[in-house]
Image (cartoon, coloured by chain):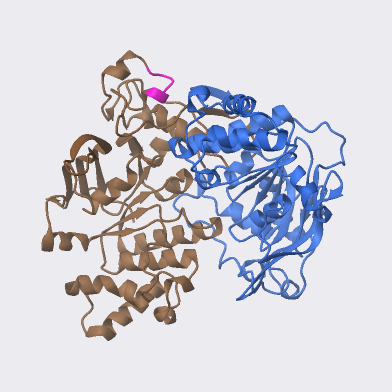
Amino acid sequence: MAPSGEPILQVKDLVKHFPLTQGIVFQKQVGAVKAVDGVSFDLLHGETLGLVGESGCGKSTVAKLLMNLEKASSGQVLYKGEDISKVSGKALRAVRRNIQMVFQDPYTSLNPRMTVADIIGEPYAIHPEAAPKGGNNAVKKRVQELLELVGLNPEHINRYPHQFSGGQRQRIGIARGLALNPEIIICDEPVSALDVSVQAQVINLMEKLQNEFNLSYIFIAHDLSIVRHISDRVAVMYLGKIVEIGAETEIYDHPTHPYTQALLSAVPVPDPSGRDNRERIILTGDVPSPANPPSGCRFRTRCWKAQDICAKEEPLLEIRTGLQGAAVHPSACHFAEEKDVVHAH
Amino acid sequence: MTTNQLTKPEPTDTAPGAPLLEVDDLHVEFRTRDGVAKAINGVSYSVAAGETLAVLGESGSGKSVTAQTIMGILDMPPGVITGGEIRFHGRDMLKMNKEERRRIRGQKIAMIFQDALSALNPVYSVGFQLAEMYRVHKGMSRKDAKAKAIELMDLVKIPAAKERVNDYPHQFSGGMRQRIMIAMAMALDPELIIADEPTTALDVTVQAQVMDLLAELQRERHMGLILITHDLGVVADVADKIAVMYAGRIVEEAAVHELYANPAHPYTEGLLASIPRLDLKGQDLYAIKGLPPNLMRIPPGCAFNPRCPYAEDICRTDVPPLIEAAPGRHSACHFAQRVLDNNGGS
């Protein structure tokens, strides 16, 4: 289903700083890990927004903030106009019914002592108003329907997680996410723990479910080719900030931020032809610590374009002048320019 | 910041037909309380000096167990080598005594592990651990060994090696730790390196750095490299030839370009087809149906038959041998020719 114009989720200048403290009895704050530092984006109805970046760039923290699993330091997360970073209690529960999450590791995100029926049925215990009418039998029937929906045998309802393979467990996680008929599902690395041949099965299932229920996905992953396959739009994060955002072809075929270009060129392409004359941008060094990010542009310490202005002035995420065609999309670089990189297929 | 051409190792210039290492019909099983898991069921491959062999497979395919058996670090029990030979320079290592094997391990064949944090000892400084190689194997003094350790850290491009030599593993980033693993493997100038998923735990930008370094060192020193991975992209970038493993057997072996252009086994074909591609955006990905088999209950006949679109009756009864399907290419499939033709002929 094509995404429609209205945003279902609006994120405005979201910030999360984790305090660093010193001392045991008299704790004082000596700094902060700026995990998410001013992130803004919209999620449209029925769309998939891919969120990519290296480990430590804050993608998973964003996911937690969207669910209000972490309290934001500042900023807003508007679900249909209501700021969910401020609500709590009953109101929060009502919001969470519509925003569900699928986790990365299907081995640890399912309770080993609960049966599949308990795991998938638990959302109904927490949200009785959403439970199917007719008591336990109705819930059981609904769980079986969900199992069938995600391609599992409904007769396995009394089995435990360890009796399933990794791919099947991820399907259980998805079924649990679907139980309350949410509108948004936040998927935090949903396939990275799975074998190559099983990844495709789970991706196909997620696309099928999106079409069937008109779901909006926020899809967090580090595998750029999978993100490209499933996403309508993509946001690239670096050290707690979005450095570039745009439609999937804008990001992959016409990247303008040096970090996006380096990231794309670093992805190994599963095609040996042409590997000898491929140009690669190999970044030097590591990602700086988010507790002490560089001044100005955070990428400047690893950037080959960096000049004095990059250390002084922080580039805003905005449409840059002098670009043409698909390169016209928000990019946080003073020297944004399109570069033809060998991109992930 | 460097921009450089990705280069691959020069072709080998040692006598052709004299491989460095040959694994010949290796069988390994694990005897556990729950039953016998047949992890390796007749694996054969060879590597020459200067050559990169990629062993590609999913978890449980036996790729790491083969490597551990070559290194002689397989847990025995429960592991049992039930047959086969591993020849290094023509001599069967499985028949050597402990002392002989130890002289090969580390000095002639070295290994790089996936998770550098758990492979390094957290209570010793990295300099100590690197120097240990020289003290134990070469009998150097502490001072000389430490100087060598700093040299090694320079070799793998760790910035400010002199200052960091006394740091502990936790003080390094993931990419730097993996560089230290590589330095440790390089220490005694081995002829063969086995790298078991060396970059799986790393981010792509760091992965590119580490793979670059590994390829460069291999080229300079003309070493053989066995690269174990599940990542089709990494393999395409660096390998000369590829062995694809499934359920403890090699199902296809070929030079890298041929294998990607025209797979000769349905499993390889399926893996390549399941990679998201630009022209298939918006469509379903090709998915290999079903799951990898349980090694305690490998299906009779071809282990891949329950998941295979080509399967016929013969596949459920006869194990297909790994035979030449086309010049220079081997496939363990009864219908290899049909798979080849299906992908554009050869």
In this rendering, the answer to whether B325 lies above or below A273 is below
B251 horizontally vs A249: left or right: right
Q: Where residue B311 sits: x, y (%)?
A: 69, 69
Of residues B61 and A233, the one nearer the viewer is: B61
Residue occupying image coordinates x 74% and y 48%: B254
In this rendering, the answer to whether B91 lies above or below B174 is below
Of residues B79 and B6, the one nearer the viewer is: B79
A172 horizontally vs A241: left or right: right
Chain A colour as displayed: brown
Q: Residue furthest top?
A: A308
Name the quadrant containing residue A294. Answer: top left
Residue occupying image coordinates x 26% and y 84%: A136
- Does residue B267 appear anywhere in the picture? yes
Name the quadrant containing residue B271. Answer: bottom right
B85 horizontally vs A239: left or right: right
Which chain is drawn using blue? B
Residue occupying image coordinates x 73% and y 36%: B190
- Does residue A343 appear anywhere in the picture? no
Q: Where residue A134 sits: x, y (%)?
A: 22, 85
- Looking at the magenta stretch, what is its main secondary structure? loop
Q: Is residue A302 magenta?
A: yes
Q: Residue furthest front?
A: B141
Of residues B164 and B143, the one nearer the viewer is: B143
Which segment did they paint magenta? A301-306
Q: Where residue B10 sits: x, y (%)?
A: 74, 30
In this rendering, the answer to whether B40 lies above or below B297 is above
Name the quadrant containing residue B58. Answer: bottom right
Q: Where residue B230 sits: x, y (%)?
A: 59, 51
